[in-house]
């Protein structure tokens, strides 16, 4: 299953937690909760201020995650820090925009939040905003391998890249709605405009190469804790594909973009079954930087 615990004794808890996650995602869709609000699963606190230290500091939320099951891999799927195009509300996609000063600061807070975790592999998109964010995290885990791959790049938005989101929001929503209804071959308009199925295929391939997902060609499974720094829309698309729950899949595809340097946590079993443990965790950032 996509959400909840995989033990019979936890059935009631699992159902309640799933309802809580769907409720939070519904609020995202309705606009009553901003993109920086935390959605949760498995009873984990996600970007709430109550879990955050007043000065930002090292996140307490990461210490509250449910225990990782024996044989599972924990994937920390992160969004990059802020860029000037983020600040201006522009569609980025494959446009290779640098982090701005705020984004560089956010990356440091993110690195602090992940510093005490036993991360054995740090990977990222090959786009600069994700790569620099991941490099900052890697400084705190310098003995871990560092990988970069276009498999984790943002969705290519074709002709919409560079446009103000406010001017093309309805066009984007129409495509996300089509994807959520099962038409994964609808592309973004223009040269290189990507489809859901294309993005999912490369995302899955990237995780197989890292050993996070099982693969016949993988020499060995990845370390038990893996950080991948990627992009807001790509993260939601990938998690929707890893998730077997159709209602949650539809919600994820239509949810608003994630906060900069937000942390999503996905547990992956040896057979490739995935459980979303937390979404959009931002309690490592001071409130003013979310």
Image (cartoon, rainbow, N blue to C red):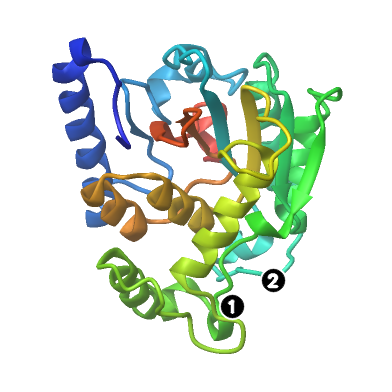
Tell me what residue is drawn at x 53 percent, y 75 percent: 194
User: In the current view of this chain or complex, which residue is farthest to the bottom?
Assistant: 190
Residue 232 versus residue 169: which sits nearer the camera?
232
Helix, strand or loop at label 2? It is loop
For residue 95, which numbered disc appears in the image?
2
Up/down of 1 relative to 252, above or below: above
Using the rendered view, name the quadrant where residue 191 is placed.
bottom right
Residue 247 visible somewhere in the drawing:
yes
Residue 4 versus residue 205: which sits nearer the camera?
205
Where is residue 2 shown, x and y percent of the image? 32, 37
Disc 2 versus disc 1: distance between alpha carbons? 7 Å
Tell me what residue is drawn at x 48 percent, y 19 percent: 61
- The residue carrying pointer 2 sits among few (fewer than 14), some (14 to 19) or many (20 or more) residues within 10 Å by Cα, namely some
Q: Earlier in the sequence, mark 2 or mark 1?
A: 2
The residue carrying mark 1 is 161
Where is residue 64 shown, x and y percent of the image? 45, 13
- The residue carrying pointer 1 sits among few (fewer than 14), some (14 to 19) or many (20 or more) residues within 10 Å by Cα, namely some
Q: Are marks 2 and 1 in contact (CB under 8 Å)?
A: yes
For residue 32, which numbered disc appears in the image?
none
Residue 114 versus residue 106: which sits nearer the camera?
114
């Amino acid at each position: 299953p996509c959400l909840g615990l995989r033990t019979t004794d936890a059935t009631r808890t699992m159902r309640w937690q799933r309802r809580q996650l769907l409720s939070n995602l519904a609020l995202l869709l309705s606009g009553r909760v901003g993109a920086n609000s935390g959605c949760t699963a498995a009873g984990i606190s996600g970007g709430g201020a109550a879990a955050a230290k007043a000065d930002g500091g090292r996140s307490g939320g990461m210490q509250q995650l449910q225990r990782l099951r024996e044989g599972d891999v924990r994937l920390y799927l992160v969004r990059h820090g802020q860029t000037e195009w983020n600040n201006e509300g522009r569609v980025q996609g494959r446009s290779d925009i640098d982090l701005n000063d705020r984004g560089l600061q956010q990356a440091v807070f993110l690195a602090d939040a992940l510093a005490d975790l036993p991360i054995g592999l740090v990977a990222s998109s090959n786009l600069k905003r994700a790569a620099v964010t991941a490099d900052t995290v890697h400084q705190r885990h310098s003995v871990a391998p560092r990988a970069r791959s276009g498999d984790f790049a943002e969705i290519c938005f074709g002709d919409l890249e560079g446009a103000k989101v406010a001017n093309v929001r309805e066009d984007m929503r129409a495509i996300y709605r089509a994807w959520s209804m099962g038409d994964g071959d609808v592309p973004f308009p223009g040269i290189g405009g990507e489809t859901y199925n294309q993005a999912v295929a490369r995302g899955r391939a990237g995780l197989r190469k890292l050993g996070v997902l099982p693969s016949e060609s993988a020499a060995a499974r990845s370390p038990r804790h893996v950080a991948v720094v990627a992009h807001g829309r790509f993260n939601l698309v990938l998690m929707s594909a890893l998730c077997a729950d159709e209602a949650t899949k539809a919600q994820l595809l239509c949810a608003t973009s994630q906060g900069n340097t937000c942390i999503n946590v996905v547990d992956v079993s040896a057979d490739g079954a995935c459980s979303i443990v937390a979404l959009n965790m931002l309690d490592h950032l001071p409130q003013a930087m979310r």
